[in-house]
């Protein structure tokens, strides 16, 4: 999932970037309005977090420019807290409006909410499957033989998507880290813990799928029926 952060406050943009990366997003940034439009056209993000007080083009100009061509989810994040500012932002096409200072957890939750409402139709396949397990990447739901089994965190969702795209193939730990935490945002210990949490949610639910540890290399999502996971750690 890709997010574009548009803010001319570099320190705050870094905080937002860190928050979204921890939640499993791939992040790009722009620090003025013209760069925001260029990044949107080039990077094709799934959502935009947009400040209003921007140089070159202000936030509302960026909003109108992008909204004239796309229905991409856009969340305004601004110090402007007046009713007129909020109403104008929403009427011009923003999907949500958050006033600074903000709660990082609330920001992630509201971004995910607008993504769900939009259906996120252009960012991912509708479903992934391996053996009896099906993953809905939008709602982060896993089903077994058509029955809802549970929900995944954003990072678990990203890890399972990567494994399902490459099922029955061994992926190195470094490859998985780069796909789940863009720009080297994790280490092997963090990946090991994430794999452990994912295993708790998918293994035991199905006899046809498990995450295999390949010592010294990485991990593989194995889909051979009834095979015993002798190398799991």
Image (tube, rainbow, N blue to C red):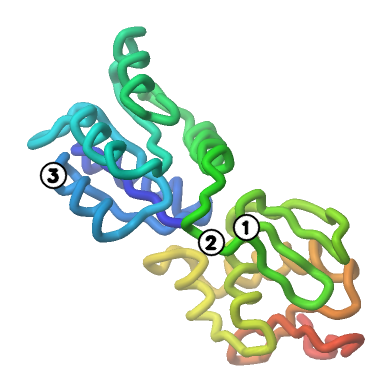
Residue 193 shows up from this direction = no
Residue 144 shows up from this direction = yes
Most extreme residue toward the left is: 56
Distance, label 1 to label 3, CA atoms, is 32 Å
Name the foreground residue: 116 vs 183.
Answer: 116
Q: Name the residue located 70 percent from the left edge and 85 percent from the top edge.
A: 213
Name the foreground residue: 169 vs 102.
Answer: 169
User: Which numbered tag is attached to residue 167?
Assistant: none
Look at mark 3 in the image and give the residue it sits on: 34
In this picture, residue 170 sits left or right of residue 88? right
Please state, as top left, top right, bottom left or bottom right, where the C terminus lies in the image.
Answer: bottom right
Q: Quick one: label 1 or label 2, which is nearer the N terminus?
A: 2
Q: Quick one: label 3 or label 2, which is nearer the N terminus?
A: 3
Name the foreground residue: 114 vs 81.
Answer: 114
Residue 29, placed above or below residue 89: below
Q: Name the residue located 37 percent from the left edge and 66 percent from the top edge.
A: 183
């Amino acid at each position: 999932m890709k997010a574009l952060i548009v803010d001319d406050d570099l320190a705050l943009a870094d905080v937002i970037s860190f928050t979204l990366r921890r939640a499993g997003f791939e992040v790009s940034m722009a620090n003025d309005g013209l760069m925001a439009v260029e990044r949107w056209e080039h990077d094709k993000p799934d959502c935009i977090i947009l400040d209003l007080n921007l140089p070159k083009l202000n936030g509302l100009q960026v909003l109108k420019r992008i909204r004239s061509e796309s229905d991409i989810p856009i969340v305004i994040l601004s110090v402007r807290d007046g009713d007129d500012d909020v109403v104008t932002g929403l009427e011009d096409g923003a999907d949500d409006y958050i006033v600074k200072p903000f709660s990082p957890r609330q920001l992630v939750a509201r971004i995910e909410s607008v993504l769900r409402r939009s259906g996120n139709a252009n960012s991912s396949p509708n479903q992934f499957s391996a053996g009896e397990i099906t993953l809905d990447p939008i709602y982060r739901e896993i089903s077994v033989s058509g029955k809802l089994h549970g929900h995944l965190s954003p990072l678990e969702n990203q890890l399972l998507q990567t494994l399902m795209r490459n099922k029955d193939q061994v992926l190195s730990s470094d490859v998985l880290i780069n796909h789940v935490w863009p720009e080297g945002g994790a280490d092997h210990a963090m990946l090991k813990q994430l794999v452990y949490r994912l295993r708790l949610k998918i293994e035991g639910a199905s006899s046809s799928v498990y995450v295999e540890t390949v010592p010294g290399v990485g991990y593989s999502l194995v889909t051979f029926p009834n095979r015993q996971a002798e190398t799991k750690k």
